[in-house]
């Protein structure tokens, strides 16, 4: 059995049509939905692979506002046996150090696992510091840029392949350890038993996501026993010097929406596609 904790964060949905900017080109958070950070989906897929091959428990954790419950729900759709949200007004404005402290303390309260897995970077903050800082606070050895993982449960060790520039390194680490998945991480299921277990676990986790309340807990700073000086803005040594507005790409094409029921318009589209192909 190998128990894993996966850290996940909610980020603005940057997909075209979902993201909204204010007139000064800063993000309009009120109008832009919050979704599961794309890199964290990969971290969850790594945990699912470990569960398929070795059993154990996958716990998903996040620090953020109470609304992040939907983010944890999205995470459970990929995989999770249970989900914890560390949420408190005092945690607001945390930099990566204060975030790592909160996550680490939360993991200690849950019970430290064999492997902690974090995503590569977030789509908004993008520092990539939170995972390594949490590993440091937990005193776990860390392997970053991981593209594949094998766990040797008998000898209590992990063999990971990681990207190092243009090279692939093979790293061995004792358990417990901390893994940061690379965006190129790929789970591999070669046996029929594993593939069938993967499908069964996927079905089970989707059912859990739909009824998240039975596996979801939210803990505030007091419940986590956090030092108020180490969390939120107070616990964040980072000073943001300047914030640049996000440049929006100039619109290069215009779109015309036609109804699928309008045969004449569809015939015109087909004619134009044929003309474009012929050149
Ligand atoms: C304008 C602005 C500027 C900022 N500048 C800085 C800065 O320069 N330095 C700094 O340290 N912080 C900064 N922050 C704060 C930073 O966004 C937060 O600390 C954030 O929670 C984590 O950093 P990140 O988004 O870079 O995550 P990353 O370190 O890129 O995240 C890596 C992985 O860590 C995990 N993770 C990250 N955050 C959470 C979370 N809340 N809950 C669960 N898992 C998580 C996820 O698995 C994620 O994939 C800034 C914030 C703002 C609004």
Image: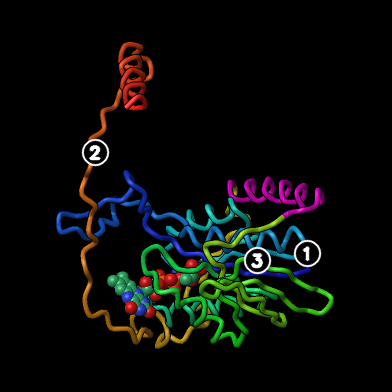
Distance in Å between CA atoms under marks 3 and 1: 15 Å
Q: Is residue 97 found inside the magenta-colored segment of the image?
A: no
Q: Residue at x 21, y 76 (%)?
A: 242
Residue at image mark 1: 54
Q: In this view, does 108 lie to the left or right of 156?
A: left
Secondary structure state at the residue bearing disc 1 = helix
Q: Nearer the viewer, residue 184 or 261?
A: 184
Q: Is residue 31 left or right of residue 81?
A: left
Magenta stretch, overall SS? helix
Magenta part of the chain: 189-210
- Which mark is drawn over residue 148? 3
**Front position among marks 2 and 1:** 2
Q: In which quarter of the image is ligand 1?
A: bottom left
Please report whichever mark, 2 or 1, sits nearer to the chain's N-terminal start: 1
- Which mark is drawn over residue 89? none
Is residue 87 at least partly visible in the picture? no
């Amino acid at each position: 059995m190998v128990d894993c904790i996966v850290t996940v964060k909610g980020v603005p949905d940057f997909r075209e049509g979902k993201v909204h900017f204010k007139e000064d080109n800063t993000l309009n958070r009120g109008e832009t939905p919050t979704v599961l950070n794309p890199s964290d989906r990969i971290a969850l897929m790594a945990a699912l692979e470990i569960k398929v091959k070795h059993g154990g428990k996958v716990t998903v954790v996040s620090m953020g506002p109470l609304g992040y419950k939907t983010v944890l729900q999205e995470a459970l759709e990929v995989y999770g046996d249970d989900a914890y949200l560390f949420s408190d007004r005092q945690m607001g404005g945390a930099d990566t150090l204060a975030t790592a402290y909160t996550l680490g303390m939360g993991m200690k309260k849950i019970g430290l696992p064999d492997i902690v897995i974090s995503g590569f970077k977030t789509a908004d903050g993008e520092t990539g510091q939170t995972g390594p800082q949490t590993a440091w606070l937990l005193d776990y050895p860390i392997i970053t840029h991981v593209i594949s993982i094998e766990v040797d449960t008998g000898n209590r060790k992990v063999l990971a392949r990681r990207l190092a520039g243009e090279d692939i390194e093979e790293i061995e680490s004792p358990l417990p350890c901390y893994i940061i998945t690379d965006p190129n991480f790929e789970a591999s299921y070669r046996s029929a038993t594993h593939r069938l277990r993967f499908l069964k676990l996927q079905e089970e986790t989707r059912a859990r996501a739909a009824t998240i309340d039975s596996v979801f807990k939210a803990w505030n700073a007091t419940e986590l026993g956090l030092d108020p000086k180490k969390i939120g803005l107070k616990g964040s040594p980072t000073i943001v010097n300047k914030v640049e507005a996000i440049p929006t790409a100039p619109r290069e094409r215009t779109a015309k929406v036609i109804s699928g029921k309008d045969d004449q318009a569809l015939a015109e589209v087909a004619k134009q596609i044929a003309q474009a192909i012929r050149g």
